[in-house]
Image (spheres, rainbow, N blue to C red):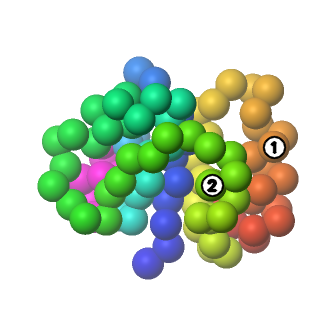
Amino acid sequence: MKNIHWLGSGLSSIPGIRRLASNNHNLTVWNRTLAKAQKSIDHVNNDNVSAQTFNIKEIVEKVQQGDIIVSQLTASMHLDIAKICLEKKCH
């Protein structure tokens, strides 16, 4: 099963994160503050779901070919995230 990396866990992200987390997807939520990432998945008791502090270098290391990246980051970050997707052959 491929992994989903959700970047940013602000208010508009919560419904999508919770839906994916509740459906047994391999999901990592990355956010600037770990507490906020954890809060977005606090209702889930699933080993396939985790929270991480946002760190672009760690994301590059973790993302694998075929993974999915959902970016809810500011527009200024979109180009960097798109480059990662192209380099890693992910979506």
Image check: 20 left or right of 22?
right
Residue that mark 1 sits on: 80
Q: Name the element at disc 2.
A: helix
Residue 37 location (% of width, % of height): 39, 36
- Please, is residue 87 above or below residue 49 in the view? below
| Residue that appears at 30% across and 52% down | 21
Residue that mark 2 sits on: 59
Q: In which quarter of the image is residue 9?
A: top left
| Residue that appears at 35% across and 31% down | 35
Q: Which mark lies nearer to you, 1 or 2?
A: 2
- Please, is residue 25 above or below residue 44 in the view? below
| Magenta range | 18-24
Image check: 11 left or right of 44?
right
| Residue that appears at 41% across and 21% down | 11
Q: Which amino acid does label 2 sit on?
A: Ile
Image check: 80 left or right of 65?
right
